[in-house]
């Protein structure tokens, strides 16, 4: 009977340890996840701006202004290009 009781205590201790370990892992993952998402967003943004610069170049902004298509779009592209160039 003593063996059964001590084994039961050990199982309970193992379960509690596993539960705490899982909680720590979950907390670590939840704290890393926003950081990783931000890093991915920044990388994707860099890739997009690099593609835009290589495909279209600065001529797109000038063309938007010339054609009066949408100054808002042109200004948005221009701001993006300037912020990308600062990095």
Image (cartoon, rainbow, N blue to C red):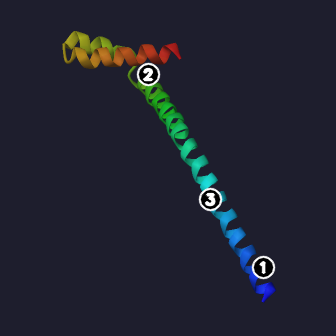
Q: Pointer 1: what residue?
A: 6
| Label 1 CA crowd tier, 10 Å (few <14, some 14–19, many 20+) | few
- Per the model, the C-alpha gap separating discs 1 and 2 is 69 Å
Measured Cα–Cα span from mark 3 to mark 2: 45 Å
Q: Which residue is drawn at 25% across and 15% down?
A: 64
Q: Residues within 10 Å of mark 3 (few under 14, many from 20)?
A: few
Question: What quarter of the picture does the N terminus occupy?
Answer: bottom right
- Badge 1 or badge 2: first in the primary sequence: 1
Residue 30 placed where, x, y %?
Answer: 54, 47
Residue 78 x, y percent position in the rendering: 36, 14
In the image, which disc is placed on residue 22? 3
The one of 63 and 81 positioned closer to us in this rendering: 81
Horizontal arrangement in the rendering, residue 29 relative to residue 54 (left or right): right
Lower position in the chain sequence, tag 3 or tag 1:
1
Image quadrant assignment for residue 48: top left
Q: How far apart are marks 3 and 1 (CA)?
A: 24 Å
Residue 23: quarter of image = bottom right
Q: Position of residue 25 (x, y in %)?
A: 62, 53
Between 71 and 15, the one nearer to me in the picture: 15
User: Which residue matches tag 2?
Assistant: 53
Which residue shows up at 46% across the image and 30% down it?
Answer: 45
Dot 3 and dot 1 residues touching (CB under 8 Å): no
Residue that lies at the very extreme toward the right in this rendered image:
3
Q: Is residue 56 left or right of residue 14?
A: left
């Amino acid at each position: 009977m003593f063996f059964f009781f001590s084994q039961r205590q050990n199982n309970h201790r193992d379960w509690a340890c596993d539960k705490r370990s899982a909680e720590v892992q979950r907390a670590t993952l939840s704290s890393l996840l926003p950081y990783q998402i931000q890093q991915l967003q920044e990388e994707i943004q860099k890739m997009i701006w690099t593609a835009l610069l290589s495909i279209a170049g600065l001529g797109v902004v000038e063309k938007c202004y010339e054609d009066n298509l949408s100054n808002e779009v042109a200004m948005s592209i221009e701001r993006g290009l300037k912020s990308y160039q600062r990095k």
